[in-house]
Image (cartoon, grey):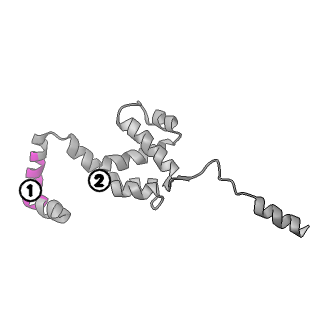
Amino acid sequence: MLQHRLAHDRRVRHQRSSRRHFRDRKCAAVIRALTAARLYLGGNVRTLTEAAASCGSSVPYVRAAAVLIRAERTVLMQQALVGHVNLLKAAREAQGLARLVQAYRTAAPTDRIAFARVIGPTDLFDNVIAEAI
């Protein structure tokens, strides 16, 4: 009986789950959410719900992925993809930056100049540009 059991244990293969969480060392849920967010932001689908359904994701995950894309935080996106950072937590962290980047990208050149005048060039340079260098 014991010999039969040992022989059987050697032949048993562990099956992969049909619902694997990672593929090629990347989180499948984050990949689906980023794909859906790109569809939505690119105008290929009309709603977050439609984007989520088309990629097998959820609306909160697609919304979070869209925030990371808008924030242009590729490092944070990569950390979420490999599972080092939770996607929803990363999106909360990047929300303010996403708003700033979107406002800057959509602002007219005259509005950007007016913004610099309101903030003041010294403040803008010392607290933004010098800090980034």
- Left or right: 13 as drawn, with respect to 81: right
Q: Can you identify the residue that label 1 sits on?
A: 120
The verdict on residue 121 being magenta is yes
- Kindly identify the residue that appears in the image at 70 percent across and 57 percent down: 14
- Kindly identify the residue that appears in the image at 40 percent across and 56 percent down: 78
Amino acid type assigned to the residue bearing label 1 in the image: Gly
- Left or right: 12 as drawn, with respect to 16: right
Visible in this render: residue 14?
yes
Q: Which residues are magenta?
A: 113-124
In what element is the residue under mark 2?
A: helix
Which of these two is toward me, 120 or 21? 21
Main SS of the magenta part reads: helix
Identify the image quadrant of residue 76: bottom left
- Left or right: 65 as drawn, with respect to 3: left
Residue 25 x %, y %: 50, 56
Residue 108 x %, y %: 15, 39
Q: Can you identify the residue that label 2 sits on?
A: 97
Amino acid type assigned to the residue bearing label 2 in the image: Leu
- Kindly identify the residue that appears in the image at 50 percent across and 34 percent down: 54
Q: Disc number at residue 73?
A: none
Q: Against 3, is 21 above or below?
A: above
Label 1 – label 2 distance at C-alpha: 20 Å
Which of the two marks, 1 or 2, is nearer to us in this view? 2
- Kindly identify the residue that appears in the image at 12 percent across and 55 percent down: 119
